Amino acid sequence: MLDGGFWRSLLLSGLMAFAVTALSAGLALRLLPVLLPWLDRKSWRFVFYLPLAVPPLIAGVLSLQWLGNSGMLARLAVAMGLSENNFPVLINDPAQIGLGFTLFMLTFPFTLLVIRNHHEGARLTQLSDLAATLGASPAQIRRKVQAPILLRRAAPTLFLSAVFLFGAFEAPMLLGRQYPAMISVYINQKFSRFNLDDVPLAYAATVVYALLLLAALAFFLHRKKQEES
Amino acid sequence: MRRFFFSSLLLMFLLPFAYFLAASFADQWRFPALWPPGWTLQHWAALGGAQWSQSALQSLALAALVGAFATALGFWTAHGLSQSPQARRWLLWAYFPYAFSPVIYAHGLKYFFNVAHLSGQFWGVLLAQLVLCYPFAVLLFYTHFDVRMREMEALSYTLGAGPRAVWRRVLIPVSRPALLLCFFQIFLISWFDYGLSSVIGLGQVRTLTVAVYQYITEANTGLAAVSACLLCLPPLVLLWVNQAFLQKNLNT
């Protein structure tokens, strides 16, 4: 009953959630030592919380206004003497670049703050100093000491973040392609169409989505329980 | 190099607020103009209209009521759940609506809301958001009711307090920062919600998020920017309150 569109949507959502979470975590780990002086200062820390005040719908609208063919970046390109026809398509594009970038911008500040909190809790400064005393280079300290500890501690939050991204709706609705669409957009399309044959398909897709989510949550709680015991 | 990274991030983080503020005052800001040709107050002046007041009030009332109900219910449920040996099993189900895409959840609920004549009604959207936010509140409070809290409660009973006195004089006062934090978080979930409000509200419950989407589909950038500014304002205020007062209280 479920057509190819459903499985492609599921695959796209999974890949997008994984790619955005991995990129956010990777960049947050890389930038943390650089940004730590500002993150530790109470007067500047507020700045890193600012993106959390932007709803996903507004983030989608902002990307539409900046990355679209008549958006601010296209205007900047024209002002620099480039032809507007040469401006790349970044909204509803086949590679979903605009959507990926928007989801990344929604996730990255949160990931950075989570990793920073774990950095504080894990006493990484002392461990890094110890590794340096034993002869490790800064790159080795980052790769073999800081990254594994921080990723392990932040794994539950990153996992839940990926689950949210998997079901993201507002930004994909505004910036993503209609086919293949992210899973929430796909199911919403099937529920909202006038063709009544699509409604059972929408329910079937919802059941598969719910089962996948349930399995992911059961796995998450099982791992959490294992780590606690 | 450090300063360059920080300045770039700062620029990107401040960009949404600066852009929407500029767009809300811009007059006829069309392609390929890099800067608005003129400034106007007409988009903000439209705020006095009945439709706007209704949208802003509906969003505010929904967020405040859902926040209050979910916080109270979640607090009470988590207290009971913390004493249950089956708590972990129940928690799995509490994570479920929390992780589920709100728009798909809304489509799943829609039939029941249609039958109960709650679709397209303010109270229908409120109930739907409550269904989504209540488990979230339970999850937040479940970790709050730790061994220390349970021992404090047991000590109060030992000293002769009744159940009512324990709630009024021990549990609620001790949990005040956590209650406020939960209220703020749920307020924001409700304030940011688009999926549930659009599906259950059928476009008749015109919250600010629904209004933004409507203005974008009408290509009315000025009014969409005003709605975006209004949507970002309460989270910014709550963020400041959280940073200035709550974090301090939670840390002490």
Image: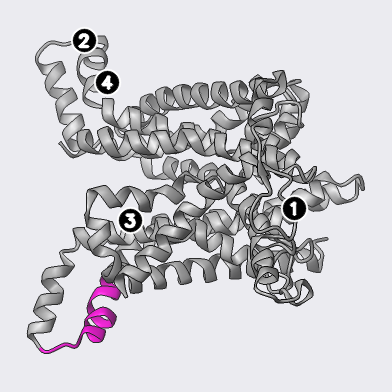
Contact, mark 3 vs mark 1 (Cβ under 8 Å): no
The part of the chain drawn in magenta is A135-149
Q: Tell me the quarter of the picture where residue A124 sits.
A: bottom left
Rendered position, B47 above or below A221 = above
Real-space Cα distance between discs 1 and 4?
A: 54 Å
Subunit of mark 1? B
**In terms of secondary structure, where does tag 3 sit?**
helix
The structure residue drawn at horizontal position 53% and vertical position 50%, both measured from the top left corner, is B16
The structure residue drawn at horizontal position 71% and vertical position 53%, both measured from the top left corner, is A173
Residue assigned mark 1: B30
Within 10 Å of disc 2 (Cα), the crowding (few <14, some 14-19, many 20+) is few
* Residue A92 percent coordinates (x, y): 74, 64
Q: Of circles 3 and 1, which is in front?
A: 1
Depth order, front residue of A150/A208: A150
The reply to whether label 2 and label 4 mark residues of one chain is yes
Residue assigned mark 2: B162
**In terms of secondary structure, where does tag 2 sit?**
loop
Q: In the rendered structure, which amino acid carries the disc numbered 1? A: Arg
Q: In the rendered structure, which amino acid carries the disc numbered 2? A: Gly
Q: Which mark is residue B172?
A: 4
Subunit of mark 2? B
The structure residue drawn at horizontal position 25% and vertical position 82%, both measured from the top left corner, is A144
Subunit of mark 3? A
* Residue A105 percent coordinates (x, y): 51, 60
The structure residue drawn at horizontal position 63% and vertical position 54%, both measured from the top left corner, is B35
Rendered position, B241 above or below A116 = above
The reply to whether label 3 and label 1 mark residues of one chain is no
Q: Earlier in the sequence, mark 2 or mark 1?
A: 1
**In terms of secondary structure, where does tag 1 sit?**
loop
Does residue A229 show up magenta in the picture? no
